[in-house]
Image (spheres, helix red, strand yellow):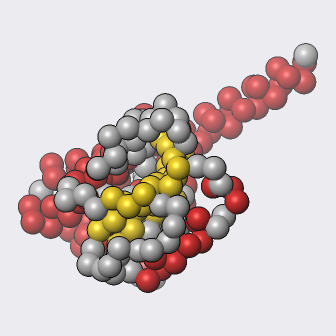
Amino acid sequence: MRRAVIFILCLALLSGCQASDIRSYWNDVPLLEADIRLSEDRFADFAELAIAAPEADALAAMDVLFDRLTQDSVAYYVYSEWVDGAFYNPLSPCRSASLYGKAVERMVADAVLELNECEPFLQRREWIEYNQPGAPATVPGCASFDSRTLVLVLDLSCPSCRQALERLSSDSQWAGLRHVAVCCGRGTKPDVPGWEYLFPENFTVVFDPHVTPIYFLVAADGSVEHGYTPAF
């Protein structure tokens, strides 16, 4: 019993230290080093801390960062791209709708970037909100789910996307699941059997065509069981 209490206290202390670290992370450090790789590494460390910290602390730390960035327009542009890569890109382990949404909110409010420069970030903020784990699945052209479903999002003009159809259909972990392929781009309809092919006109309302191929898993109740995963 005593060991269990000590373990719980250690976890609480560790969590508190992490929260403190994230809140003060950007205090008194240069935003852009002479060697920009050092700054990029520092931001990568911040992203990893932020994704693991309590959300309120991570969001507050993001505000601290952007408060400082407003004083340096060059750094603002550089960090905007790093934020995009860390918190939006499906390949990133730090992908987060809440942190990315906070960053985009600041980009618009701070008015350091021109409105047209903010538009791609605003569009990606809309895309990242769809098909979050635990949320109802949104798949244009698919009205309902009554069984576990593997959804592959692909561009017909992309060879690796077409290869993903073959690779996923032959993967035993997906055997017995319904397979749905949501397609965009120019190209002939694939002939890989076992897939339901959808060609929705409103594809880009939900999906980012620049990050295909990705797949996700939908539970029988229609909720997202597992979020976006690269299918390279």
**Of residues 184 and 8, the one drawn nearer to the viewer in this rendering:** 184
Depth order, front residue of 137/115 = 137
The spot of residue 62 in percent (x, y) is 37, 48
Q: How many marks?
A: 0
Residue name at image x 90 percent, y 24 percent: 3
- Residue 137 on image: x %, y %: 40, 41
In the rendered view, tell whether residue 144 sits above or below residue 165: above
Placement of 230 over or under 175, stated as above or below = below
Q: Nearer the viewer, residue 39 or 89?
A: 89
Left or right: residue 49 versus residue 80 is: right
Query: Residue 109: where, in percent of width, then height?
Result: 15, 49
Residue at 27% x, 74% y: name it: 185
- The answer to whether residue 7 of the structure is visible from this angle is yes
Left or right of 77 in this view: 230: right
Report the residue that reaches farthest toward the left. Answer: 115
- The residue lying at 25 percent from left, 58 percent from top is 200
The answer to which of 137 and 201 lies nearer the viewer is: 201
Answer whether residue 63 is visible to the viewer in this image.
no
Quarter of the rendering containing residue 115 = bottom left
Name above or below for residue 62 compared with residue 85: above
Q: Residue at x 42, y 57 (%)?
A: 196
**Direction from residue 188 to residue 25 in the image, left or right:** right
Q: Quadrant of the N terminus?
A: top right
Name the residue furthest top: 1
